[in-house]
């Protein structure tokens, strides 16, 4: 990955006094001072960067030395952080191009290799995990104790992050790269955490990247990879990002829609993940749900794919058919659905558990693509996670259970309404309300 200056270099940005003191203490602890050669930087950063990215960063910084100097000062040493984190649009894109290299196309324009950029993002993601491991981050450990990050998942997530970037075959124009850097949340977060760790500085982006995982037992297993968790979590509203609570899996609970209902009802916001037909996909449900014949949720809901390529499908605002969750009704669909309409779902999990559906199009979610290669699929594995703090129980709120003291007709209100619409009078309606428990 090249280090030649491809564009005119902007003015440099310095750390503030507090950050300088923190960096100085960090360097003194590591036995370093105010002058650095390539070996010094490699020694400082080898536990935080994968080898290819370590070489790219140190090569870039040594190119900041004037003439044939073998050492750089503190200003040059922190330039990569100052430019990629604190810099303006021009500083960020210029610095990244200097790190990964560029070339000129047949029209004489500077272009970047899409393949090279994907490799850089993949190295950045892997370095992010390496830094968390070095720092024994508790949130990171809460996931890796149950499943280590896998390269294949890192690659599909990396491709998903980069796929939003317009390109012509392998060529990416500088203007497109600049816009992408300004809009990609994941790239900004990864740069913030990885570069912050190199200089012992707090991340500039304060969003939670890796949530704390809460498991029912230490032996509970998941098919979710941490890179996939980070991808999903980056699109979830901030208030739900800090905590993921394991609620249900087919491996733990078996193929039971009743157990799914008991596990996810009234548990707050949810992430549902399914593996079927060699595809991994699911949806984010923005609010607590309970069985009933109605559409719920809001525009924070979204569908996603994780494999073979990561993609996220946000709300279009065209309709409010975000989440449908119903059970034990004879006249309406029974299952869990997201998007679309009855029998034309963006995602459907049937109450006859083990089977699901998706459609070729879905007006509820933007840029939707069919989640598997088949409209009807057999679920291989499924998990449900509560995200964010669990909502208070009725007892904690000082309320009665919503089903306590109700009659059968009140609990089966859909059937009651249909019978009344057909002209059948409900003579027993209201009877039993005053009978003490």
Image (spheres, grey):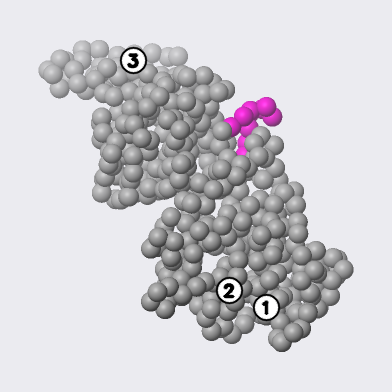
Q: CA distance from mark 3 to mark 2?
A: 70 Å
Dot placed on the residue nearer the N-terminal end, 1 or 2? 1
Q: Quadrant of the N terminus?
A: bottom right
The answer to whether marks 1 and 2 mark residues whose Cβ atoms lie closer than 8 Å is yes
Dot placed on the residue nearer the N-terminal end, 3 or 2: 2
Q: Earlier in the sequence, mark 1 or mark 3?
A: 1
| Residue positioned 38% across, 76% down in the render | 107
Q: Is residue 91 above or below residue 212?
A: below
Using residue 425 as the reference point, say whether residue 329 is left or right of it. Answer: right
Looking at the picture, tell me which residue is in the foreground, 63 or 283: 63
Q: Which residues are the magenta region?
A: 213-222
Q: Secondary structure at mark 3?
A: helix
Where residue 7 appears, x then y in whole percent? 52, 81
**Left or right: 313 with respect to 251?**
left
> Is residue 220 covered in magenta?
yes
Q: If the image is split into quadrants, where does the C terminus sit?
A: top left
**Tag 2 residue:** 98
Disc 1: which residue: 63
Q: Nearer the viewer, residue 389 or 230?
A: 230
- On the question of residue 57 being in view, the answer is yes
Left or right of 238, for residue 191: right
Q: Which mark is residue 408?
A: 3
The image position of residue 210, as x and y in percent, is 61, 48
Q: Residue at x 25, y 49 (%)?
A: 318
Q: Are marks 1 and 3 in contact (CB under 8 Å)?
A: no
């Amino acid at each position: 990955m090249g280090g030649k200056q491809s564009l005119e270099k902007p003015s440099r940005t310095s750390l503030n006094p507090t950050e300088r003191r923190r960096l100085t203490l960090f360097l003194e602890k590591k036995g370093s001072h105010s002058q650095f050669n390539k070996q010094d930087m490699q020694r400082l950063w080898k536990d935080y960067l994968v080898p290819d990215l370590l070489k790219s960063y140190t090569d870039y910084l040594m190119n900041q030395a004037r003439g044939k100097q073998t050492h750089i000062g503190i200003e040059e040493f922190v330039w990569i952080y100052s430019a990629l984190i604190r810099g303006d649009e021009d500083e960020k894109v210029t610095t990244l191009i200097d790190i990964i290299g560029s070339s000129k196309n047949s029209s004489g324009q500077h272009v970047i290799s899409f393949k090279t950029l994907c490799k850089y993002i993949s190295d950045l993601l892997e370095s992010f995990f390496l830094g968390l491991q070095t720092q024994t981050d508790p949130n990171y450990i809460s996931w890796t104790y149950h499943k280590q990050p896998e390269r294949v998942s890192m690659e599909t997530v990396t491709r998903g992050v980069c796929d939003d970037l317009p390109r012509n075959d392998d060529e990416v124009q500088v203007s497109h790269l600049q816009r992408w850097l300004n809009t990609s949340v994941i790239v900004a977060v990864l740069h913030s955490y990885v570069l912050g760790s190199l200089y012992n500085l707090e991340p500039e982006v304060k969003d939670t990247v890796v949530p704390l995982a809460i498991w029912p037992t230490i032996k509970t297993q998941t098919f979710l990879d941490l890179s996939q968790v980070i991808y999903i979590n980056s699109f979830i509203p901030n208030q739900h990002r800090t905590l993921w609570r394991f609620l249900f899996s087919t491996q733990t609970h078996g193929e039971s829609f009743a157990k799914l209902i008991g596990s996810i009802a009234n548990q707050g916001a949810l992430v549902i993940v399914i593996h079927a037909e060699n595809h991994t996909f699911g949806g984010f449900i923005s609010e607590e749900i309970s069985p009933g014949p109605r559409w719920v949720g809001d525009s924070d809901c979204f569908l996603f794919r994780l494999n073979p390529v990561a993609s996220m499908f946000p709300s279009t605002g065209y309709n409010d058919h975000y989440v449908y969750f119903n059970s034990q009704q004879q006249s309406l669909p029974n299952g869990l659905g997201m998007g679309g309409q009855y029998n034309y779902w963006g995602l459907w999990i049937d109450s006859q558990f083990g089977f699901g559906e998706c459609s070729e199009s879905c007006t509820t979610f933007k840029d939707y693509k069919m989640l598997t290669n088949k409209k009807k699929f057999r679920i291989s594995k499924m998990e449900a996670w509560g995200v964010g703090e669990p909502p208070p129980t009725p007892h904690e709120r000082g309320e009665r259970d919503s089903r306590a003291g109700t009659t059968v007709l009140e609990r089966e209100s859909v059937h009651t309404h249909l019978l009344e619409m057909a002209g059948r009078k409900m003579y027993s309606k209201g009877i039993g309300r005053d009978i003490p428990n």
